Amino acid sequence: MNLNEMIKCARGEKQADLLLTNASIINVFSGEIIPGSIAVANGYIAGFGSYPAKKVVDMKGRFVAPGFIDAHVHIESSMSCPTEFARCVLPHGTTTVAADPHEIANVLGAEGIGYMIDSSKDQPVNIYFTLPSCVPATDMETSGAKLGADDLLPFMNNSRIIALAEMMNFPGVIYRDNEVLRKIEGMKKQRKPVDGHAPGLTGRDLHAYISAGISSDHECTTEKEAKEKLNAGMHIMIREGTGAKNLKNLLPIINRQTARRLMWCTDDRHPHDIIKEGHIDFIVRSAIRMGLDPLTAIQMATINTAEYFGLNNVGAIGPGRQADLVVFSDIKNPVIEEVYFRGNLAAREGKILPEIKKPAPLNIRPSMNVNIDKIDFSIPAVSKQARVIEIIPHQLITGQSLIKVAVSGNLAVSDIKRDILKIAVVERHKGTGNTAVGFVRGFDLKPLASSVAHDSHNIIIVGTNDEDMKTALEAVFKMGGGLAAACNEEIRAELPLPIAGLMSLQPVKTIKEKLDNLIDISREFGSSLNDPFMTLSFLALPVIPELKITDKGLVDVAKFKIVPLFEK
Amino acid sequence: MNLNEMIKCARGEKQADLLLTNASIINVFSGEIIPGSIAVANGYIAGFGSYPAKKVVDMKGRFVAPGFIDAHVHIESSMSCPTEFARCVLPHGTTTVAADPHEIANVLGAEGIGYMIDSSKDQPVNIYFTLPSCVPATDMETSGAKLGADDLLPFMNNSRIIALAEMMNFPGVIYRDNEVLRKIEGMKKQRKPVDGHAPGLTGRDLHAYISAGISSDHECTTEKEAKEKLNAGMHIMIREGTGAKNLKNLLPIINRQTARRLMWCTDDRHPHDIIKEGHIDFIVRSAIRMGLDPLTAIQMATINTAEYFGLNNVGAIGPGRQADLVVFSDIKNPVIEEVYFRGNLAAREGKILPEIKKPAPLNIRPSMNVNIDKIDFSIPAVSKQARVIEIIPHQLITGQSLIKVAVSGNLAVSDIKRDILKIAVVERHKGTGNTAVGFVRGFDLKPLASSVAHDSHNIIIVGTNDEDMKTALEAVFKMGGGLAAACNEEIRAELPLPIAGLMSLQPVKTIKEKLDNLIDISREFGSSLNDPFMTLSFLALPVIPELKITDKGLVDVAKFKIVPLFEK
């Protein structure tokens, strides 16, 4: 809205559009609950108190708080496009997110970032972005793009880009890689923060990382770690996602002095959890249940995050800010009853209102570049001693073993009895034909394939025999990306993710149902893993110990290098 | 320092320059006092804990806090140039200021702002600026410059300009003056805050003012006013200056929830008070004495202000921040014993160290443009009933009376017995010859003249007879600006302020002595006013009720217009 109009409405020279009366207003500036009215005009808060208004809604004493903010989220983890993500989190009270399009950037580079920015306009959630700082994560894999400082600089003054995203490359920082420093300096020049990502970093290395200008971290897992980072000047994003759940461990660091530098984030939250538990609202409720003062929990979901990112338009109920509001009845268990977005009632009792229109989907180029016919999963048996990736249930880290694998003819093959399956990664960005094949223990099932494979998102396939693996691969290819389960050369279940092989245009609920079906099939296939697709998606991430596989081969993460499959 | 070097030092790859051991570190992030060591390299904090260092200094358990920040100050009010101001406040622990060059801007416009920026480089205090938003304050006076949005825009992205300065023109905001809105929008585009100045503004007008994007106020005088502004989203600067003292009244608003949005400022603090009482340190001590938690008082002098202005380089002891530190022994009465600026010991026991060099003074064009010979203080007696400005001791507001003035021949003249003196304002910027003459009651003394006369800083003269007034005027003119006292056509005391007629290159101590002498003479002249020059300096400010005088004539402030001297 233009300033002239804003001021006119705040003065009450024009009728407000809406007056919410009899509200218990959560004032995050003063930390008080103040009974009163809120006037809304043109989607913004005009003021408190009595205003002439076209429409008056009695809040009947219910609590009205600012809409919640997710300080760090990968929309891709919901497997839905920005439109469907917004429609899914809005009823939970999330009205603003700082989204890091790290996954799509690894597939489609600057084009992917541009797609996310464009396709998240005019949504019923304010979708801001942090700019992916580490694409690709390593050079031991083939990603769809490489984003250097020169590629990122043109994005930095974009008003929807609010920070440099998680700087995972902490060796690049502390050993002063020129490209890394240029990215940091570029964003600091824009007076925007640089988000960190430095699990376990401590002492002088932590000081060095912070001295470079990195001002937050969302990877703390212990009170001690979080406290050290906070004391050295970092803002701490407390994460409660699907994979990583840090709320319980970090709760003790929250007190009257530290709270202002703390905020909530989900990072990666899968469709099941959003639908079943909620989003930032779930974290707020959980924290209160664990004993946190409700006002503090709400400040960590609102004003703290807005201040950290310099977003003066959101995060509070005050004149000139967007009228993004959540309504609930119980301060000790804030279940979101209504959500206003830019002054319009947009969701009620967990459902987005039908009048909230979907913007038309945008086109994006296909991301599958594989010559299926040439892919060969056979493994010549160079020796019998092969490196095997050992799955550790409920963890992202893996073990590794040297095992005598089964041989048939002159080929090494899966050994179903011992649960040693083949695993393959097929490069899918540049048509290089790169295919690495190895062995994994712990899946205990029939072929599955996925184009969601952090961070380069090549196609990863696990299975008992080459034919079924090929069938699953082909299914993923044909969908333009997605997840598939195959058996006896037949597709048993699939989830198409045609946007960069990562996201669907379907509602999150539909995605969840298809995922449920895939997991049911995987149970039928014999797996006892919680979510074998999630396990699979982290097996190509060569920064998490101990043995991983990329399109370039097996990676010994401790040695940070490619190692041969066979040991003599 | 370049980032590469910074990171290297923080990692301890290079020896630190200095290690302060055995310190009780005031950690403003966590609100704790943490015993430990602080490593300093190249003027920046490298880290905490053990570091190899060239020099080790044992703090013997004393407290080490971040250097203090003044959130809003007019350096001109110290009557000293930036160099001497810095040398005066540094020993009190002020290491950063947000200076508003409003006074010099009214005299020399953009050139004056440029002079302040340039002449405050390389000082032992970080001198940042807020950009004067209201030059001139009104059009009922002749100022040296007029600064429109187009004049200000080129300054806005300057890294030493950190905000738009106090937006005094609140009618301009709420009635949406285009130039005013352009100034605000320009600064917001730079992601920098817009400081407010809105004494007594309340309700919808306050909401309108805030909705325009104005994010602070330093003019609150009551708890109620401050609370209303804070609740509506403003950051509150609590002011304790020479004229305005708000600490005691505003102390009740400070609590665990509100403190983070509060900070200290001096606004206008005269040489006497800085030398006798101190600067921000004085406010911190006073607040603690009145019962405020010391950590909170220090946060309000450090991190809160740094965060408000987005200054991540100061305001805390943490890796990558400037090593601006204050040292004291008593947490309940922090008398500053030592001050480090950029890692160097710069002041000890109230005195700047001799090795802290003064940068060479810069030239600035003279600001006195008056044809003295043509100035005429005679008042043709149009009628006997004249408007008289009534001084109210200890207040900036004046009264007004209609009084039969003394007449000699056909001229109205001073009437010493009734203490009705002549007061004149002589335009000194453009050589217009504009001279307004009127009457004032309450001075009770012989002629004084001053080129410090808010906000346009024309020459203001009060006196018993035209000859002595002329002598005083001439003295001010010859000094290129300043204060003077004359009697029997002889100069009895003077203080040259050659920089824009506002500031001296002399040390603040010398200025204070000369001011003392001027005040002693004014006592001898018969005045019982505390500081008649200060009283004089506000008589030309046509925004403070009730009757004021500018070079254009008498101003009835309530009517906001020029009124005639005589009433028939």
Image: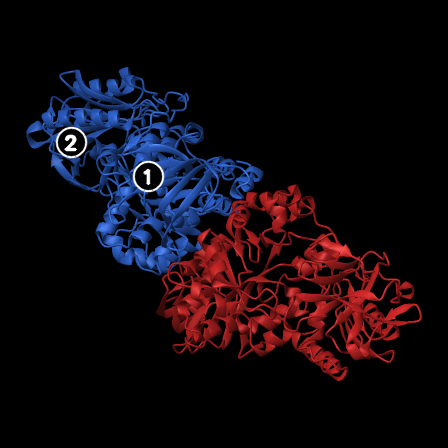
Chain colours: A red, B blue
Q: Residue furthest bottom?
A: A524
* Front in this rendered view, residue A150 or A391: A391
Determine which residue is flagged by label 2: B383
Same chain under badges 1 and 2? The reply is yes
Pointer 1 residue: B93
Q: Is residue B515 above or below residue A550?
A: above
- Give the mark nearer the N terminus: 1 vs 2: 1
Give above or below for A96 relative to B107: below
- Rounded to the nearest angstrom, the CA distance separating label 1 from label 2 is 57 Å
Residue B183 drawn at (x, y percent) = 47, 43
Mark 2: amino acid = Ser
Q: Nearer the viewer, residue B246 or A471?
A: A471
Residue occupying image coordinates x 41% and y 24%: B359
Q: Nearer the viewer, mark 1 or mark 2?
A: 1
Q: Position of residue B46 (x, y in %)?
A: 48, 42
Per the image, label 2 sits on a secondary structure element best described as loop
Q: Residues within 10 Å of mark 2 (few under 14, many from 20)?
A: some
Residue A262 relative to residue B240: left or right: right
